[in-house]
Image (cartoon, grey):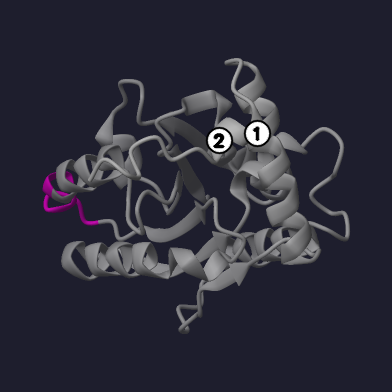
């Protein structure tokens, strides 16, 4: 029986892109996994549930090229429990970021790999996803198996296969961007900030103001 533990490491909890990506992955793994546990680092949980798993999937947003502080604290505590377990679960990461390019998450992947080397857990690979907030905000209008998000869907298929596969051959991290021009992403983000500013009665011109420019 394969036990899998899904960990939402986003400080935003259930409203996060990380939770959305876990939900999408669960739709793919539902027929292959016999027992699943869901943990949010915002809530209390049992570390033994994590260490007793056959596979761990941790999802979180990129914070300044690294892990959120809550994920760092979680790993520090998990290391203590790992010393008292004979199981060596596979570990996977799903890291989303605000950058367009998924490879911006590469440094966070290295930290998780080093954690596995220290604890004896088995690092398999990570999936770095660019434009994470876009993935979340369009979840109801753009399916994950659409052309725009197809690479994310395919990467989840690969992750599912690896979980149920007993082979431990080396796997490369997967880095993904949405399938449309970066220029469109930047233009949409710029417009989004302008619309958001209107909620606070701030105009587009005010966003570009430099009130302290000549006071230094």
Residue 30 in the image, given as x and y percentages of width and height: 69, 43
Q: Nearer the viewer, residue 197 or 7?
A: 197
Residue 215 in the image, given as x and y percentages of width and height: 26, 40
For this view, does 5 lie left or right of residue 213?
A: right
Picture disc at residue 204: 1
With respect to residue 213, does 123 lie above or below?
below
Residue at coordinates 59% horizontally, 42% vertically from top-left?
Answer: 22
For this view, does 101 lie left or right of residue 91?
A: right
Picture disc at residue 207: 2
- Mark 1: few/some/many CA within 10 Å (<14, 14-19, 20+): some
Tell me, yes or no, whether the two marked residues, 2 and 1, touch with CB atoms within 8 Å: yes
Q: Quadrant of residue 204?
A: top right
Residue 176 in the image, given as x and y percentages of width and height: 64, 67
Q: In the rendered structure, which segment of residues is drawn in magenta?
A: 80-86
Is residue 213 visible to us here? yes
Q: Nearer the viewer, residue 172 or 50?
A: 172
- Mark 2: few/some/many CA within 10 Å (<14, 14-19, 20+): few
Q: Quadrant of residue 127?
A: bottom right
The furthest residue to the front = 214
Picture disc at residue 103: none
Residue 25 in the image, given as x and y percentages of width and height: 65, 47
For this view, does 171 lie left or right of residue 76?
A: right
With respect to residue 113, does 30 lie above or below?
above
For this view, does 141 lie left or right of residue 211?
A: right
Callout 1: SS = helix
Residue at coordinates 47% horizontally, 66% vertically from top-left?
Answer: 104
Residue at coordinates 66% horizontally, 59% vertically from top-left?
Answer: 156
Residue at coordinates 79% horizontally, 66% vertically from top-left?
Answer: 181
Magenta stretch contains residue 92: no
Q: CA distance from mark 2 to mark 1?
A: 5 Å
């Amino acid at each position: 029986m394969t036990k899998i533990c899904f960990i939402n490491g986003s400080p935003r909890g259930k409203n996060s892109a990380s939770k959305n990506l876990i939900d999408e992955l669960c739709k793919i793994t539902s027929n292959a996994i016999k027992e699943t546990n869901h943990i949010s680092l915002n809530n209390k949980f049992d570390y033994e549930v994590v260490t007793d798993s056959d596979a761990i999937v941790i999802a979180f947003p990129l914070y300044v090229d690294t892990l959120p502080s809550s994920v760092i604290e979680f790993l520090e505590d998990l290391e203590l429990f790992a010393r008292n377990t004979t199981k060596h679960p596979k570990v996977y990461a799903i890291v989303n970021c605000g950058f367009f390019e998924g490879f911006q998450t590469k440094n966070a992947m290295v930290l998780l790999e080093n954690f596995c080397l220290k604890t004896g857990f088995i690092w398999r690979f990570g999936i770095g996803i660019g434009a994470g907030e876009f993935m979340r905000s369009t979840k109801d209008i753009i399916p994950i198996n659409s052309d725009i998000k197809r690479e994310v869907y395919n990467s989840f298929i690969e992750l599912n296969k690896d979980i149920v596969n007993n082979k431990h051959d080396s796997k490369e991290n997967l880095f993904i961007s949405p399938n449309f021009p970066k220029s469109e992403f930047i233009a949409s983000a710029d417009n989004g900030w302008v619309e958001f500013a209107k909620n606070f009665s701030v105009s587009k011109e005010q966003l570009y103001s430099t009130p302290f420019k000549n006071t230094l």
